[in-house]
Image (cartoon, rainbow, N blue to C red):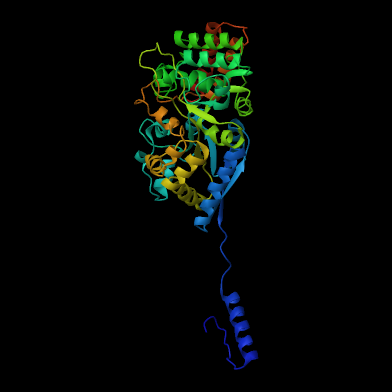
Amino acid sequence: MGGGAAVRIRTGRNGLLGLLASLVLWAVLTQGPARAATDIVWWHAMQGELGRQIDKLADDFNRTQSDYRIVPVFKGSYTETVTAAIFAFRSRTQPAIVQVNEIATATMMAAKGATYPVYELMRDEAEPFFPMAYLPAVASYYTDLDGNMLSFPFNASTPILYYNKDLFRAAGLDPNVPPKTWPELGATAQRLRAAGVACGFTTHWPSWVNVENFSALHNIAIATRANGMGGLDAVLTFNNLLMVHHIAQLAEWQKTKVYDYSGRGTTAEPRFQRGECGIFLGSSATRADIVANARFEVGYGMLPYWPDVPGAPQNSIIGGATLWVLKDRPRAEYKGVARFFTYLSRPEVQAAWHQHTGYLPITRAAYDLTRNQGFYERNPGTAISIEQITLKPPTQNSRGLRLGSFVLIRDVIEEELEQAFAGKKSAQSALDNAVERGNKLLRQFERANP
């Protein structure tokens, strides 16, 4: 035998045992140490049912091969995750992948020395990558002016209308007919309140639902320069007559809890799940937690619109996040990241993610597969998010937004909305202040990124 070891073959039981022991020893001596898989750390901002789906995605990929191991790490909210990544990069302890919410896209684009654009990564690692395969409403949010994809679309969502069918029945409402317009929503919520429901309707992520998506659905601009897609010198313009009318109406409904403000972020979701509010306007990706926790029959509908606005409804825009690749990691990790992104793009993987979470499928193939599997027929309402973002071809006003420091601007907007809902400011005054304060932040960002 090779390796310089000679084995004398003897007959009999003892001889056979000796032969086997010698073969095992020879194998141990001549075989090199097993190569460990390369760990690829992925910082994310998902917990609960969505966090479990993240872990499943990583585990499923890890089982497909032995060279790389995706290691998901929950780092808190989107803001906490991005902040942690920034500090980690400064100390050279950054992960290879970080999940960043959509409104921080301009900030990540400005950090050119810290990010590895996805289109370059996939090209450098010779992984198949076809941007045209991704849904335009998703991909366009994360591409530069030349159409190059900078981050990998991952969890894209859009707000939709959820309602409690049991409460509808108790209030004498048709459980199969969700309100379609804002006047219908107001009248429905008043019926729910009259039937003893504590809160007619509520929303989460107030700016995302009631300013950003409201504007897109009515084809009005949030800011100049195509909502910032055309350059950093954009100026906020959402203190327009339609927006003032809308916020004033919410503030009026707030007085009788026809509309009941539930706070920022995701604080409204538990109120709907507990049956406190009959209607909830929130992310399509909330479906996973709602289905898991609600003890009532859930109905679905599109976002309401004001019927006197010409052309409405237009289309909604996405929220959620993408996966950004950070620089200065070992080259071996980048090969694994590219392979992981290829895996995430598989139709069957995307279809399962979409079906289990409520997030949009990022490719047309995943949507077609889900439809062909009969998922939408078995689960009425689950196609609403896709139908809503593709309702009409997007315009400059409804493609999305890319504004510097928008995480901070969104806080400003929500501070001012809270003043209006509490009756401390008029809708016009609140929105004027939000625009003025937000424009100051835009100019600061522009000066810092010449």
Q: Residue 257: x and y, percent?
A: 61, 14
The picture quadrant where one finds residue 140 is top left
Is 308 placed left or right of 273 in the picture? left
400 vs 56: above or below? above
Is 393 placed left or right of 51 in the picture? left
Q: Nearer the viewer, residue 297 or 419?
A: 297
Looking at this view, name the residue that lies furthest to the bottom. Answer: 11
Q: Nearer the viewer, residue 115 or 205?
A: 205
The picture quadrant where one finds residue 180 is top left
Q: Residue at x 60, y 86 (%)?
A: 19
Q: Residue 132: x and y, percent?
A: 34, 39
Q: Residue 335: x and y, percent?
A: 47, 51
Q: Residue at x 52, y 50 (%)?
A: 333
Total numbered circles: 0
Q: Residue 114: x and y, percent?
A: 52, 38
Q: Residue at x 48, y 40 (%)?
A: 355
Is 149 placed left or right of 103 in the picture? left
98 vs 230: above or below? below
Q: Nearer the viewer, residue 283 or 375?
A: 375
112 vs 331: above or below? above
Residue 52 seen: yes
Residue 107 seen: no
